Image: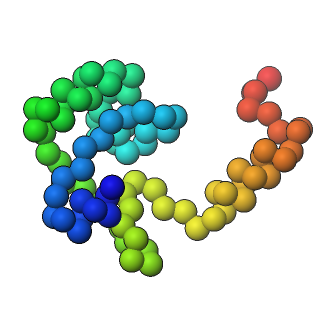
C-alpha cells in the first residue's frame, strides 16, 4: 500500500489489526479500538512520514535483511527456548 501511495502522491490509511502494529503505534493510533482508528481517518487527519526504498520497493517502519527470518526459524525449531522469564 505504501508503494502505491507514494507512486500516486496519495494518502495511506492505517487500521491497526494483527499483532505488531508498530507503524500504527508510531502514528499514535489506538491499538485496541478499530472504531476510534476509523474515526481518525474519517476526520481527515494527515501526517507526513519518511519512507525508504530498497530495490525499487517502498517501505515504511521496518526493513530487514533476512537475519530476523533466520532467528525466527531457529526459535521455532528449538524446543528449549522459552519466552517465560521464570
In this figure, which colouring scheme has been used for the structure?
A: rainbow
Q: Residue furthest left?
A: 44
For the C terminus, the image quarter is top right
Residue occupying image coordinates x 18% and y 65%: 8
Quarter of the image for residue 4 reads bottom left
User: Could you say where residue 70 lies in the image, as x and y percent from the top left?
Assistant: 72, 59
- Say how many tags the image has: 0
User: Could you say where residue 20 lies in the image, as x and y percent from the top left?
Assistant: 49, 38
Q: Is residue 11 above or below residue 28?
A: below
Q: Is residue 59 above or below residue 82?
A: below
- Left or right? Give the position of 52 relative to 74: left
User: Could you say where residue 9 lies in the image, as x and y percent from the top left?
Assistant: 16, 64
Q: Is residue 85 above or below residue 11?
A: above
Q: Residue furthest bottom?
A: 55
Q: Residue furthest right?
A: 80
The answer to which of 39 and 26 lies nearer the viewer is 39
Residue occupying image coordinates x 37% and y 45%: 23
For the N terminus, the image quarter is bottom left
User: Could you say where residue 65 lies in the image, as x and y percent from the top left?
Assistant: 58, 67
Residue occupying image coordinates x 25% and y 44%: 13
The answer to which of 16 and 27 lies nearer the viewer is 16
Quarter of the image for residue 26 reads top left
Amino acid at each position: 500500500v505504501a508503494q502505491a501511495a507514494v507512486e500516486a502522491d496519495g494518502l495511506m490509511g492505517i487500521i491497526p489489526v494483527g499483532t505488531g502494529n508498530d507503524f500504527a503505534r508510531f502514528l499514535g493510533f489506538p491499538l485496541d479500538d478499530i472504531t476510534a482508528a476509523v474515526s481518525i481517518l474519517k476526520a481527515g487527519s494527515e501526517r507526513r512520514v519518511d519512507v525508504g526504498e530498497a530495490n525499487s520497493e517502498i517501505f515504511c517502519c521496518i526493513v530487514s535483511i533476512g537475519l530476523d527470518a533466520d532467528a525466527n526459524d531457529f526459535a521455532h525449531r528449538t524446543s528449549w527456548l522459552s519466552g517465560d522469564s521464570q
